[in-house]
Image (spheres, rainbow, N blue to C red):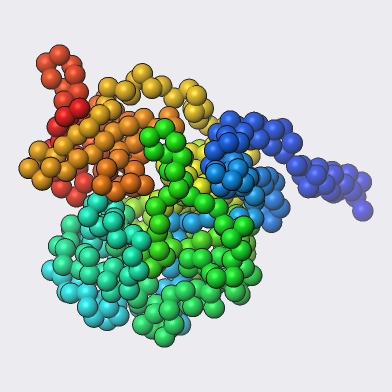
Amino acid sequence: MNYRLLLYTLSLIACFHVSLAQDYEEEKLIIDTFLHEEYSENKPGAAVLIAKGDKIIYKKAFGLANVKKKKPLETDMIFQLGSMSKQFTSAAVLQLVEQNKVSLNDKIQQYVDYYPPKEYEITIEHLLSQTSGIPNFFDVDEDELRLLSQEHTPQQLIEYYADQPLLFEPGTQFQYSNSNYPLLGVAVEKVSGLTLEEYLAKNIFQPLGMKSTNLWYREDFKKKRIAQGYRFEDGKFVRSPKVVGSVVYAAGGIVSTVDDLLTWNRALQNRTHLSDTIVKQLTTEKTTTDGTGTGYGYGFFIGELHSYKTVEHGGLLYGFTCDALYIPEEDIFVCVLTNKSRERPEEVADYLASIILGEPINILSKSALNYEEKKEYLGTYQMVDGAKKIIEIKFVDDLVMVYFPKAPGTEVEIKATDDDTFESVTANIEMIFSRDDTGKIVGFTAEQGGTSEWTKIE
């Protein structure tokens, strides 16, 4: 062998062994310090997993699974995923598309005959890509949220919004709406002859060995492994309101663990169960009819962290918040599951990933978030239209939260985006505050599929 070639080969082997030996000790120390500050030992907390490829770099749980019993969270505990569930419903639909049992161009009425035709056709693709124009349901309307603890059939869920007019012509705009996914769930059931729970178990969870994942809690899940959800109210942590799985259904009913979600991530990347075509459909950004990118695939948000493409989705469900982030170019997966409403797992996941990338982004510690800058927006507001709807804006755990007094546990975090302007991506709402001649906050205008005016009464 040529001497120079031999030296080059040996150097490559040495570098390869160094990379294999890399265990991110410095990065893990930074991550550990941050997470201990983020999640207190005496409060609801989080299970966190970070992997590069098939190798788990970091896995640890923080805080309490049960506040009253002082039971610590553990990494194998089961959490509610909320909207992260949409990727599984999407995968189920795409399996049926691949089997030529469903077409992306099919009208939804072919599968859900009780959903009435609209001015424009709504297709399976419109629902998957969140471009249907169907208004969101079970979002901020307290009259609907009181039904969270009542069992529903899929038809009953859909009937809440079946007669609502479309917000726009399907395909022309992107607007995230939970309403799209019960329709997709019914389509899966209609075609497969199985309930959505049965279909997902038989065709995704069981083949992949995701033993702690299901459409809502299975009877054989041990209670000691189920994390209790919490919200912060009147200065204390209270258990989240009762939610039944049939209400959240295809839009948000999956429960799982950090390990099972890593298994799912590896199956997507290695194409061990789903085809390359399905994975690409799930994780490729879609466009509107004018070619504008939506930032969404099917059940995944497509974005960037630094210059790296990200595939990500979070979830929020009355006592639980979560996020799972994947960076394909570096094969980095970060999963953060929390058992408290209105945590910030997406920001945390982005920060943790940036540490592993060696390019840390800025993130405010909870203690650094400034109450003084935000307290003038706090108070009680009433809708001006005579409906006497009331909301409260409070400062909770360093977050500015909108509360609905008649619907406890449904609070929404709002973040400042400009002077006197706040928004919530989760609730798809923008709030622009107004001041009187003295500079005092007197109300706000809300944009959420329409405009409403609110005045400050306390």
61 horizontally vs 284: left or right: right
Relative to residue 167, is residue 337 drawn left or right?
right
User: Which of the two residues, 324 or 251, is positioned nearer the viewer here?
Assistant: 251
Q: Is residue 359 left or right of residue 437?
A: right
* Nearer to the camera, 229 or 239: 239
Q: Is residue 326 visible?
A: no
Q: In this view of the protein, can residue 186 be seen by the observer?
A: yes
Q: The C terminus is located in which quarter?
A: top left
Say if 258 sits above or below 198 in the image.
above
The picture places residue 165, in percent across and down from the top left corner, at: 14, 62
Residue that sits furthest to the top in the current view:
438
User: Where residue 3 sits in the image (x, y, percent)?
Assistant: 92, 46
Residue found farthest to the left: 386
Q: What is the number of callouts on the image?
A: 0
Residue 378, quarter of picture: top left
Identity of the residue drawn at 48% across and 22% down: 368
Rendered image quadrant of residue 300: bottom left
Quadrant of the rendered image containing residue 143 = bottom left
Q: Is residue 315 above or below residue 161?
A: above
Seen from this angle, which residue lies furthest front? 68
Vertical arrangement, residue 238 with respect to residue 160, above or below: above
Residue occupying image coordinates x 42% and y 32%: 235
Residue at the outermost bottom position: 193
Q: Residue at x 36, y 61 (%)?
A: 149
Image x and y of residue 173, in percent: 25, 55
**Residue at horizontal 61%, vertical 63%?**
222
Q: Nearer the viewer, residue 254 or 144?
A: 144
